[in-house]
């Protein structure tokens, strides 16, 4: 999501509401399992998108991306599928997956009035070692968020550790797009940056029970700057180098950090340290 920092209180969720969000999260995880199985050389991205939309409809869920308002035109698909130097918001179409591609798939749905959002980066076949390292570091930064949410008191403590991990490996966090609160709508308070600067510190928020956020590090191999293509949606790295994008929806519960969009059923919360 495009960064728009503001100091508004997060919209905290009850245990019942978090449980309902987990049901939506299960569907998102299952939809991405379909994506993993389909993402092979020769497959068109639009075919993956159609399969995800059919899956959501079959289970009574609403695909949240389709029709999402944009600056010029609504988003036309149920998934964002972005290749290589495309960071996020790629529009599925006739492009064919090829050996060596990085394919980023982001999707979200609403089930019984509650939302969940997740993204993965898939490495297709034999991928360059440096590209593999990029994906590994992005995934590690998301895991750092999961663990640190159970320890930290403020979001900047988490974001600082994520950013340090990425930069210590020679990569850069995208700063033009950030994560977000989520609940009855896909984008709620607060904005959830994966980096720390003066502006982020001013808009800091407390890690507390009932907080539900979609954390989505976008990690560039080269410089952090991005630009939007003429389709008004697809975000690419300005230097043309590849990017990785991963995301989970996390909830802070009395028992720890619950991964709303986890594959396991039921997921095991991460205990919150005292």
Image (cartoon, rainbow, N blue to C red):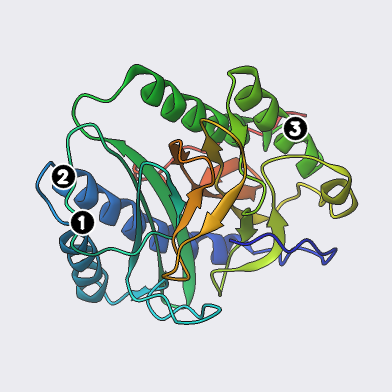
* Left or right side of 45 for 213: right
Where in the figure is residue 224, as x and y percent of width and height? 62, 40
Q: Secondary structure at mark 3?
A: helix
The answer to whether any part of residue 193 appears in the image is yes
State which mark lies toward you, 3 or 1: 1
Query: Quadrant location of residue 165?
Result: top right
Residues at discs 2 and 1 in contact (Cβ within 8 Å)? no
Residue at horizontal 71 percent and vertical 37 percent from the top: 159
Q: Is residue 148 above or below residue 181?
A: above
Q: Residue at x 52, y 77 (%)?
A: 70
Residue picked out by circle 1: 95
What residue would you read off at disc 2?
Answer: 37
* Label 1 crowd bin: few (<14), some (14–19), many (20+), radius 10 Å: few
Q: Which numbered circle lies on residue 160?
A: 3
Q: Position of residue 254 (x, y in %)?
A: 66, 46
Label 3, label 1: how far apart the Cα atoms are: 36 Å
At 18% from the left edge and 62% from the top edge, which residue is drawn?
Answer: 94
- Between residue 224 and residue 265, name the one nearer to us: 224
Q: Position of residue 1 (x, y in %)?
A: 58, 61
Q: Residues within 10 Å of mark 3 (few under 14, many from 20)?
A: some
Categorize mark 2 by other alpha carbons within 10 Å: few (<14), some (14-19), many (20+). Answer: few
């Amino acid at each position: 999501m495009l960064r728009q920092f503001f100091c508004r209180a997060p919209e905290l969720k009850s245990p019942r509401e978090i449980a309902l969000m987990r049901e939506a999260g299960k569907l998102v995880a299952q939809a991405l399992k379909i994506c993993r199985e389909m993402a092979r050389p020769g497959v068109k991205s639009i075919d993956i998108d159609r399969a995800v939309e059919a899956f959501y409809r079959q289970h009574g869920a609403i695909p949240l991306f389709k029709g999402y308002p944009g600056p010029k035109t609504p988003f036309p698909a149920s998934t964002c599928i972005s290749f290589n130097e495309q960071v996020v918001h790629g529009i599925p179409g006739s492009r064919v997956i090829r050996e060596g591609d990085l394919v980023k798939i982001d999707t979200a749905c609403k089930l019984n009035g509650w939302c969940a959002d997740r993204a993965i980066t898939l490495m297709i076949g034999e991928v360059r070692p440096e590209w593999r390292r990029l994906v590994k570091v992005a995934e590690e930064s998301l895991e750092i968020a999961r663990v640190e949410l159970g320890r930290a008191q403020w979001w900047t403590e988490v974001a600082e550790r994520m950013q340090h991990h990425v930069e210590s490996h020679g990569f850069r966090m995208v700063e033009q797009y950030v994560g977000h609160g989520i609940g009855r709508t896909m984008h709620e308070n607060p904005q959830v940056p994966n980096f720390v600067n003066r502006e982020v510190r001013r808009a800091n928020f407390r890690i507390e029970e009932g907080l539900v956020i979609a954390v989505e590090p976008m990690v560039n191999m080269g410089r952090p700057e991005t630009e939007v293509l003429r389709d008004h949606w697809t975000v690419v790295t300005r230097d043309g180098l590849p990017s990785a994008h991963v995301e989970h929806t996390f909830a802070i519960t009395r028992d720890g950090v619950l991964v709303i969009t986890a594959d396991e059923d039921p997921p095991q919360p991460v205990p919150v340290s005292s």
